[in-house]
Amino acid sequence: MKRLCLTFVCLFGGTALFQSPVFSEEIPADLIARFEQLEKETEAMRTELAALKKEKSSQKTELYQPVEETKTPSQEIHDEVARQVQESAWKKGEAYIRPYGMFWASLIGADARFAPADSVKMILPGDAYGQSVCTVAARCSRLGIDVKAPDAPILGGMEMSGRLEIDFMGDLGAVENKPSVLMRHAYWKMENDTFLFLVGQTNDVISPLNSGSLNYFVNWFAGNIGYRNPQILFGRFFYPSERMRVDWKVSLSQLCGSDFNTSDHAGRYPTIQTRLGWTIASCDPEQTPIQFGISAHIGEQCYNLALLHGTEDVTIDTWSVNADLTLPLTTRFGIRGEVFHGQGLAGVNGGVDQSVDFSLLRVADASLRSIHATGGWAEIWWDLTRKAKLTVGYGIDNPLDSDMDVAPIRSNSVLYTNIVYQFTPFLRTGVEYSYWKTLYREGYVGGDVGKANVVQWMWQFEF
């Protein structure tokens, strides 16, 4: 470079002197020849420099040319939803806040009384509660906010988001028009295509599906287990092929009982939940992917018993093994469902909300028995048109009789069918018929069978 600069100075400076009328006649011939030689060398260096630049540019293009990213339809939908959420959201600093909610009202009629008063968990014994009933309910309505924050610069960049959601089913014994708030979700998470980390309260890892029933309890206590509990969750995603994703999730959670049990029977260690799931995309982008998984949980619950000689802590085990499947047979028709088996399942809405048999003899000697239960649910769905959808399903939760001396409910089952019509993306209505049957232990006060035909007409406005 130094030589090149000196050459330019000599060339242009010398050329100027050479062309000056004062000095043109006094410049020696050998100096002129030397200038001409330098000019030729400069031109050769320019040519060589240009060639080197072109070669370097060609190598960079070959080695570092970015590969065009191809996106699956689901990724494109995710990106489009994220874009629309940001456009419709409030903005606070660098975070986007999007409120959402649902106004949900139902007219429910049955030829026998059910519990609780505004949604069906079970049918009360027919001998004492066999009279017809009709109720209008609106406490299922819910409100929530989604928050999206700037990506976290770890593990290749992770999307940060959070959710807070409530409904008004907190106290099921409250008067219908004086409801109390129930926290459904309250969590924040970091997620990318490979990792997931979540802290807060949200859906359990086990048995992740919900039935298509229009009932608020979506077959809980009648074959569908899995609730919403506080947890610390870690997830890892694998991609064995272009059309397959494998999800592994594990969480440390606290089983808090069901909506009907306000006592937290925390054990000596957190409940561990895990699930391994597969998602297999169809060649048809309009068809729902095949999804199936196996899951399990294990933990313990501690009960503080008031005995004649004082109080005593008794610990029982809680565990389950589960399987879930979503199988689309066409773009408009498919089946899905779950099965489970476990023990001490009230905290995940199993065992018909019965974890322990509180026999007086067992309470007296502090030897409580944890109740085993087996059950599941299955349904078919059929998109009749782009706006009308038909669902038919069945669910059953069957506690083990030999584990129960005084626990009242021997089994709980439901057969249901409904049709939902979507007027707009915001407004839908549906009608459901269901047949419920709840079996009680022999000699139970009020009768040993509760059964009812239930008809529900619901309206939902979602924003």
Image: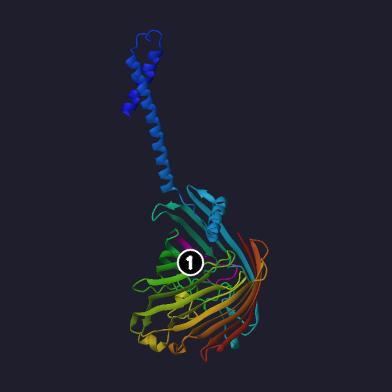
User: In this view, which residue lies farthest toward the bottom?
Assistant: 443
Q: Is residue 102 above or below residue 293?
A: above
Q: Which residues are magenta?
A: 171-189
Classify the position of the C terminus by image quarter.
bottom right
Residue depicted at 59% across the width and 79% down the height: 114
Q: Is residue 457 left or right of residue 264?
A: right
**In front of the other: 71 or 158:** 71
Residue 146 in percent (x, y) is at: 51, 57
Residue at 38%, 87% (x, y): give it: 362
Q: Does residue 51 show up magenta in the picture? A: no
- Could you say which quadrant of the image residue 213 lies in? bottom right
- Residue 131 spot, x, y in % from top left: 64, 83
Where's residue 439, x and y in %? 54, 87
Q: Is residue 371 visible?
A: yes
Q: Is residue 261 visible?
A: no
Amino acid, disc 1: Met
Given residues 112 and 439, the one toward you in this image is 439
Neighbour tally class for label 1: few under 14, some 14-19, many 20 plus, Cα within 10 Å: some
The residue under label 1 is 244
Q: Is residue 229 above or below residue 320?
A: above
Residue visible at 40% across and 68% down? 251
Q: Is residue 385 above or below residue 23?
A: below
Query: Which of the 4 image quarters holds residue 358?
Result: bottom left
Figure check: 328 above or below 95: below
Q: Is residue 183 magenta?
A: yes
